Image: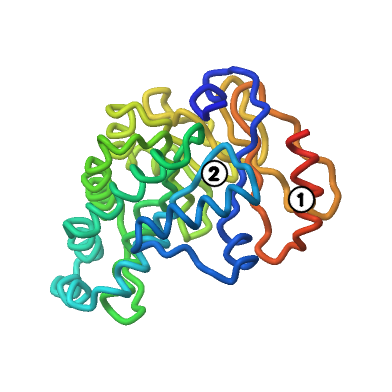
């Protein structure tokens, strides 16, 4: 079953496993994000261990790896001190844009039958990553205009994925730890618009879903700990599941999303995976 089918309301017997941290620890080998063929090979091995219906591309890891490998780009990112200037320079880098499109497209082609989801941090979180990288760990100060600008730059980067075959785009929560509000989701409008234009399933991670969010700005699905009434949901399975607690009930629309603990025992993981996929 594809993610799109599950979000549309078909019976969701498949499970989305977020396995990157676990498989990295198990293999002793991180995802080689700058080597497209290597990324495909890594995920082939990973899906042989855990048969996830969705393959994630960890956008934050791609960005951090790219920044670390390109000191000249970091120098360019430090030329302007406005809070979102380093992000604008980073996202305009043609090499990064080509790499991201190749990663998504190659995974989609190679891992047939699975949906590919790009997982990015909230716009302000990605801008903070870029700023810290440019200015030796210094944290920027934000206002709403900066968040809006970061969303615009993110949307521009995402347009390079128009022909990649991407299935889903997931935007994470802010690093601030503050609950997601309707006003903040409104600022993510440029990203929402790009996802809608290319018909990607757009998901937002939230500990609590804002009750006053206009329907025009609501995501295609929520990623949260309980099913949202009347809306597709990727229901996050509680960490206690891996210690033997029963799993969450499958949502009427959506999928179960299980984040496999990095240091879990392989035998225990296989046992608990069977509970979800039996």
Q: Which mark is residue 262?
A: none
Coordinates of residue 95 in the picture (x, y in percent): 20, 59
Which marked residue is nearer to the observer: mark 1 or mark 2? 1
Q: Quadrant of the C terminus?
A: top right
Asked whether, in this view, residue 143 is left or right of residue 43, the answer is left
Coordinates of residue 149 in the picture (x, y in percent): 23, 51
Q: Quadrant of the N terminus?
A: top right
Foreground: 254 or 134?
A: 254
- Residue at 47 percent of width and 40 percent of height: 111
The residue that disc 1 covers is 270
- Mark 1 vs 2: CB contact within 8 A: no
The residue that disc 2 covers is 206
Asked whether, in this view, residue 246 is left or right of residue 149, the answer is right
Label 1 Cα crowd, 10 Å radius (few <14 / some 14-19 / many 20+): few
Asked whether, in this view, residue 266 is left or right of residue 121, the answer is right
Compared with 209, 35 (above or below) is below
Coordinates of residue 225 in the picture (x, y in percent): 66, 41
Quarter of image, res 127:
bottom left
Label 2 Cα crowd, 10 Å radius (few <14 / some 14-19 / many 20+): some
- Residue at 34 percent of width and 34 percent of height: 165
Which colour assignment does the render follow?
rainbow
Foreground: 251 or 105?
A: 105
Coordinates of residue 170 in the picture (x, y in percent): 45, 42
Quarter of image, res 160:
top left
| Label 2 secondary element | loop
Quarter of image, res 9:
top right
- Residue at 41 percent of width and 34 percent of height: 167
Compared with 25, 107 (above or below) is above
| Label 1 secondary element | helix
């Amino acid at each position: 079953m594809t993610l799109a089918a599950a979000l549309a309301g078909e019976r969701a017997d498949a499970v989305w496993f977020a396995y990157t941290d676990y498989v990295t620890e198990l293999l002793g080998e991180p995802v080689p994000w700058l080597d497209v063929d290597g990324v495909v090979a890594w995920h082939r091995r990973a899906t042989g261990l855990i048969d996830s219906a969705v393959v994630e591309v960890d956008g934050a890891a791609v960005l951090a790896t790219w920044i670390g490998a390109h000191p000249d780009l970091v120098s360019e990112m430090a030329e302007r001190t406005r809070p979102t200037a380093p992000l604008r320079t980073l996202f305009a880098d043609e090499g990064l844009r080509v790499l991201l499109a190749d990663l998504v497209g190659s995974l989609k082609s190679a891992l047939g039958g699975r949906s590919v989801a790009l997982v990015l941090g909230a716009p302000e979180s990605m801008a903070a990553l870029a700023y810290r990288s440019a200015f030796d760990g210094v944290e920027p100060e934000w206002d709403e205009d900066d968040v809006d600008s970061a969303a615009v730059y993110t949307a521009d980067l995402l347009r390079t994925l128009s022909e990649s075959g991407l299935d889903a785009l997931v935007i994470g929560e802010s690093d601030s730890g503050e609950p997601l509000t309707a006003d903040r989701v409104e600022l993510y409008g440029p990203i929402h618009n790009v996802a809608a234009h290319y018909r990607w399933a757009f998901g937002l991670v939230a500990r609590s879903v804002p009750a006053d969010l206009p329907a025009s700005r609501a995501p295609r699905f929520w990623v949260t700990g309980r099913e949202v009434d009347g809306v597709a949901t990727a229901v996050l399975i509680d960490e206690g599941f891996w210690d033997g607690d029963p799993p969450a009930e499958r949502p009427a629309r959506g999928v179960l999303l299980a984040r496999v603990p990095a240091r879990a025992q392989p035998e225990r993981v296989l046992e608990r995976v069977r509970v979800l996929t039996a």
